[in-house]
Amino acid sequence: MDILQAIKNRPSIHSFQEKEVPEHILTEIFSYASYAPTHYMKEPWNIKVYEREGKAPFISEIMKSYQRIGLFDTGSDEKTEKMIQSMSEFLLKIPHHALIYLPIEEDPVRYEEEYAAVCAFIQNAQLAAWKFGVGMLWTITPYMHDPGFAEAIGLSAEREKIAAVMQIGYPAGIPRNRGRIPITEKLKFIRK
Ligand SMILES: Cc1cc2nc3c(=O)[nH]c(=O)nc-3n(C[C@H](O)[C@H](O)[C@H](O)COP(=O)(O)O)c2cc1C
């Protein structure tokens, strides 16, 4: 696949087949991703892939976090239970959840650089995945900023930042390409 075509045509995937992506393909995708630019060769990205029986405890912690931070009620009323159940079922059907995290740097400039490198890593992963027919959705949701969630999955909220969770699988549907604003509307050449 031509790189320029991949850049233009890669869609975010919102619905997945239940079929798993083989481990060696996921490993290859993240291996390509790791060729992202990285200042001082820090390669700050780390990935935890939740799949199979690993998904249920991960998703349960997401639900607990949503209750802790007030997105869901804390009571065990029927409406809340139903909401938790339907969101859990939706997430459980996604074959892989790849949580991407990086060490928090004390120096804000360094921290920005490391986060930027991780974002480049994520986009490389999305592009490489598309080459293998694998779809991804880059997600950032409030539980990623909940220290209780980080601790529950074995990370330190003080030392590690969760950059994103990538939902991954073979696409069940491909959204239409919504295109982009012509870049000429945003591009300026300053020549004097
Ligand atoms: C940093 C970041 C966070 C995102 N978070 C979400 C998310 O939480 N949920 C979601 O549905 N899409 C999320 N997206 C995907 C965007 O919605 C998507 O890229 C946009 O709609 C353009 O569609 P495309 O990727 O198919 O071109 C995120 C994208 C980025 C770059």
Image (cartoon, helix red, strand yellow):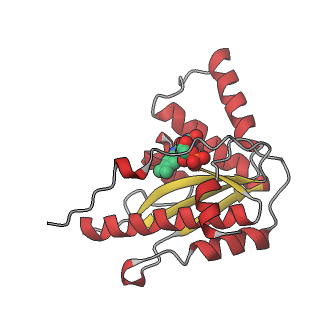
Q: Residue at x 72, y 46 (%)?
A: 56
Residue 139 at least partly seen = no
> Dividing the picture into quarters, in which one does residue 125 lie?
bottom right
Residue 45 image offset from top left, x and y in percent? 50, 70
Q: Quadrant of the C terminus?
A: bottom left
Relative to 135, is 38 on the left or the right? left
Relative to 155, is 92 on the left or the right? right
Split into quadrants, the picture shows ligand 1 in the one at top right
Front one among 48 and 165: 165
Residue 11 image offset from top left, x and y in percent? 64, 50
Residue 192 at least partly seen = yes
Front one among 166 and 4: 4
Front one among 191 and 170: 191
In the image, residue 149 above or below residue 70: below
In the image, residue 173 above or below residue 76: below
Q: Quadrant of the N terminus?
A: bottom right
Relative to 82, is 152 on the left or the right? left
In the image, residue 128 above or below residue 51: below
Front one among 5 and 140: 5
Q: Residue at x 72, y 29 (%)?
A: 86
Q: Residue at x 63, y 48 (%)?
A: 12
Relative to 96, is 177 on the left or the right? left
